Image: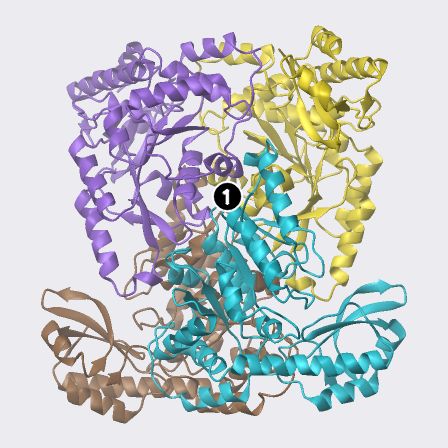
Chain colours: A cyan, B yellow, C purple, D brown
Amino acid sequence: MLHFDSDYMEGAHPAIMERLMDTNMEQTSGYGTDEYCDSAKKKIKRACNAPEAEVFFLMGGTQTNRVAIDGILRVYEGVLAAECGHISVHESGAIEAGGHKVLTLPHEKGKLKAKTVEDYLEQFYQDANWPHMVIPGMLYVTHPTEYGAIYTKAELEGLHEVCQKYNIPMYIDGARLGYGLAAENTDVTLSDIAECCEAFYIGGTKVGALFGEALVFTKPKLVSHFFTTIKQHGGLLAKGRLLGLQFDTLFSDDLYIKISRNAIEKALELKAGLKEKGYELFFESPTNQQFLIMENKKIEELKEKVSFGFWEVYDEKHTVVRIATGWATESTDIRALLKLL
Amino acid sequence: MLHFDSDYMEGAHPAIMERLMDTNMEQTSGYGTDEYCDSAKKKIKRACNAPEAEVFFLMGGTQTNRVAIDGILRVYEGVLAAECGHISVHESGAIEAGGHKVLTLPHEKGKLKAKTVEDYLEQFYQDANWPHMVIPGMLYVTHPTEYGAIYTKAELEGLHEVCQKYNIPMYIDGARLGYGLAAENTDVTLSDIAECCEAFYIGGTKVGALFGEALVFTKPKLVSHFFTTIKQHGGLLAKGRLLGLQFDTLFSDDLYIKISRNAIEKALELKAGLKEKGYELFFESPTNQQFLIMENKKIEELKEKVSFGFWEVYDEKHTVVRIATGWATESTDIRALLKLL
Amino acid sequence: MLHFDSDYMEGAHPAIMERLMDTNMEQTSGYGTDEYCDSAKKKIKRACNAPEAEVFFLMGGTQTNRVAIDGILRVYEGVLAAECGHISVHESGAIEAGGHKVLTLPHEKGKLKAKTVEDYLEQFYQDANWPHMVIPGMLYVTHPTEYGAIYTKAELEGLHEVCQKYNIPMYIDGARLGYGLAAENTDVTLSDIAECCEAFYIGGTKVGALFGEALVFTKPKLVSHFFTTIKQHGGLLAKGRLLGLQFDTLFSDDLYIKISRNAIEKALELKAGLKEKGYELFFESPTNQQFLIMENKKIEELKEKVSFGFWEVYDEKHTVVRIATGWATESTDIRALLKLL
Amino acid sequence: MLHFDSDYMEGAHPAIMERLMDTNMEQTSGYGTDEYCDSAKKKIKRACNAPEAEVFFLMGGTQTNRVAIDGILRVYEGVLAAECGHISVHESGAIEAGGHKVLTLPHEKGKLKAKTVEDYLEQFYQDANWPHMVIPGMLYVTHPTEYGAIYTKAELEGLHEVCQKYNIPMYIDGARLGYGLAAENTDVTLSDIAECCEAFYIGGTKVGALFGEALVFTKPKLVSHFFTTIKQHGGLLAKGRLLGLQFDTLFSDDLYIKISRNAIEKALELKAGLKEKGYELFFESPTNQQFLIMENKKIEELKEKVSFGFWEVYDEKHTVVRIATGWATESTDIRALLKLL
């Protein structure tokens, strides 16, 4: 059985496991106050070219989104996001549970246009009834998006300009950030990300860590007492060093980018093979998630031999399926998959 | 200056004011435990033909929606509503502030189709990811809708059947319920309303009261400790009798329906006059809110002489405007308005 | 049957009722944007000697406390209050429902000492674990207290100094503020109140209004988008003018103080009579709530003839009862009561 | 430098690390739907002698408490707990952030008496104002307590009887449950725990796991849609098998109890040594947390050589300090410590 369901099916990159083993019996202080966390934070700030940034480690994506958004927004504010945004659809209402509405916008493969955001904000304040509505308090963007699409640097800057014009912070959900930074033909670097938003997170769970996300506030003073906010949300890991050790490893010798690149290379191998076999791609995804249009008959036929994601109904006889490569995917896996398709 | 902005511009019906004056120096116990509240509740239950119902008085529509929905839903649940639903758009995120997502559905002039709701629920539970999503825990319907449209009895029953099939309560926001019950050609009575939902409220604020809404739970045990839930939300009026007195008056001698009928009659007079003058109606509203398509030039011309609501842009040169009649509108007002149009 | 249960058993002062009658059929814009609200706000700011203040009208005490505290605090903060504080005991957990802990302090008859507050804050930040605890974000004080006790001007200033030292706002719950300002021997004026806190409210419900409280933010910019916050909490009255009219009346010709004084005078008559009859007061209350120690036998004997509040068990044979006078109490009521005691 | 600050300073028990290494490159489905989780749940239910129980894995103690309590309580309810209860003091207001008040009770070394709880509940419903107060909706108990004290079986049964009488669930926070079950002279077994409450959790973080707690609902149907509730709170681990693997290991060959016993043995060695040296214990703790009264001078002297917790001020010259042993403590550590004391 082959598995291409997602990029979080294995444990962690071997270098991380080795590090956890080596340090296992060390005694450190708790809650992220240890030296491994310090070291990891320094490396991340350097990689982001953001010496003033503040870095916090959390355990998963939904948790990071909820805690960050609850920390940033005031009681009367909501968060702008694409209709398909993870916070809007697949987090069981975590943002609303924190008291905030997700204000949804139309998108293309998960990407928002600066104009869409600007029009919303402009029309919002033109509506005489706006004080009876939820005040848009921040912008949530995913990079790569839920569809694996990526923004260009100019597009991110365009969104950020709109945010600055309306004085709201921009937040980037980077659950798969590595795969975006390693994508073919991208012109977006990690320091570009840090420069064009007020907060973002570097996904570990889907990019080689056992678990963990590094939340970066790029400018000081956006939030205060954030340690307490994390604790209150049940997001503070007692043995915080586990997060520090993982990110310290990922941000040594460019490991984060190197393993992300592997996923992209494997996706390219897959894409080439698919085209050769005459498969139609749902769209040209530049990252590790590939979407193809498959006959339902074929899906039925494959189901004992390979697992992948069902994305959406395409037409009566076809379904869009998602094949995810990852940091751990090998060329032999791709060849075995292509043989079956 | 003529005012047709809304149906809550005056104070209360004179019969209510008289009653408040007559009883002003009486001493009663607080928080709705007085005999006027008791009497009003009895009259409402009788008018609803729902002897088992429980009635609570609240102060306004947004408050009633928030408290009712918070009382009904569990932490993991959201509320289904039309995209234009008042709870979704014009309550400043009150429902989300209570922790619940508003799950929006397409509509026609604010009306939901049973099929729309059923399809949503069916597809929801077919999606393998549903446990990662907000569980639809109740249905919110407005009657009349935000556009002044009304359901037929069969349509309400159809919606209720879907709710029963999925075991979720149906809740009707009756901010303007009187105007729906008094609408021409409606086949929906108050006891029909009570029969085809688990909870609804009878709007007072927009139908002749100073303020106040009567929330009716049609079957026992849907919620418990609701008094405490109201108090917690800041919705408990110390001098609760003010609400009891108003609803007792409205439900004596059919006053609630009688004054609602006045608004409908005035709307019909208006509609006849508008058609005569060649105005195009945005749609055929059967209730007290009339929407017409007006040239922007004309709007500009009128603005010193008459006020009404701007609903939405129609095209470059036209706007949809709302003219609301109410329990207090007189034929002379309509004639004066028509003279200006 | 005589009633001394509370100070909100009657309707409103006749001057208010008259005003509501006179203006009943006027048409005004909604949500507090009318001229009566404007006028009332101006009069209140003048009476407070606080031209920069912002005034908002709400419908009741619990609502005002919840909305104000939710508007002021951040997600990681709690509110300091006396253990017997209304928000801590008798609001059904409204503050916690908004996400904030009430951090309770020992008190004397509801009064907090500056030293108690200062010690708490000092020790809080000395505890190495403070980031794992709720950050004290504001101070809640009642004047008069739940026991009818009042602060001196120096005491309020002392509390405010501590708050300023720790940079947290001070908020005064003035549900019965009038009775505090009219108390014998008080040296606290309304402008003193406004000067020594960042927010407070002037209670209407218990001091002559049908309902309503005037929330005053004494300095600009403590909260933003507060109109939206009120709406979200279900605290925005559609016919907002009802609140404006009531407070405009109360703040014309010193009516608020005059009717408060009546309650104090009646309380003094009561107190004199009680002492004459040999009753022991629970403590020397300077305001309209009088607490006396009564034999349970006597309570039993009176229960068909007079109603009042049961405060707490004193000993096996005695109970502390509360007798509340109010703006509407007359000397004949007091004499009738004394005859029975 | 010796460290006795807490029982979560090291990583995980070597058997767990080995297991994580061995399975690292396996691919499993996410969110706890894998076979390791299944296996662990079966073992836990067997160990609890509770075949009908439902088990959920979460990442930390505060998270588990918050999600469990939010899942159990209704909007109008609060949770009864000791004044020193972890949820009341050291979780940054997590319970209140979920909307629920912590109703605190007096205690002895963290232990509640059945009578204390019963008196509270009885008096609560005798107070005529109870509907204006927070309804006590569940009981929170820690075993061992924050002070390391433990209940007897009879005491737990007594508390449970009161809960049953008032129809509220009893929940046991077992952050250090292993150390309670392994305590000298305890008569409480794991199946006793399961029998005398509706929900409890088996702490992993402090008893040999890298992280993780196993939440057990002892009877079916206490909560529904709990998976969704966990996700909403950001408590769902993508690679859920990490939790399954750890608990599967801890519940194989009695490892959980064996390593807990080690901590108790080391605590006994410490206690014996302390007594020999004339130290006064703050109280006779039967578990892995030992509290002694130490001269401040001595604390100062030791601070470069050993770290431990400062519990509370004892008198001007003395402080209560906490020394925690754990699953990883060795006799050589104890001897080294005793040499310094």
| Image quarter in which the N terminus of chain C is found | top left
Depth check, front residue: B317 or D115? B317
Position of C307 with respect to D74 (left or right) is: left
The residue under label 1 is which amino acid type?
Tyr
Q: What is the x, y in percent for residue A143?
A: 61, 65
Foreground: A191 or D339? A191
Q: Is residue C152 visible?
A: no
Q: Which chain's residue wears label 1?
A: A
Q: In this view, does B227 lie to the left or right of D128?
A: right
Dot 1 falls on a residue whose secondary structure is loop
Count numbered badges in the picture: 1
Left or right of B74, for residue C328: left
Answer yes or no: is residue D260 visible.
Answer: yes
Q: State the image quarter where residue C248 is shown.
A: top left
Q: Residue at x 30, y 57 (%)?
A: D106
Name the image quarter holding the C terminus of chain C.
Answer: top left
Up the image or down, B161 lies above or below C157; here it is below
> Which residue occupies 20% across, 41% down?
C161
Q: In this view, does B281 lie above or below C23?
A: below
- The x, y position of residue B57, in whole percent, is 56, 30
Density class for disc 1 (Cα within 10 Å; few <14, some 14-19, many ≥20) is many
Residue of label 1: A76
Percent x, y of residue D91: 38, 62
C188 vs B126: above or below: above
Residue B130 percent coordinates (x, y)? 69, 62
Vertical relation: A315 (above or below) B48: below
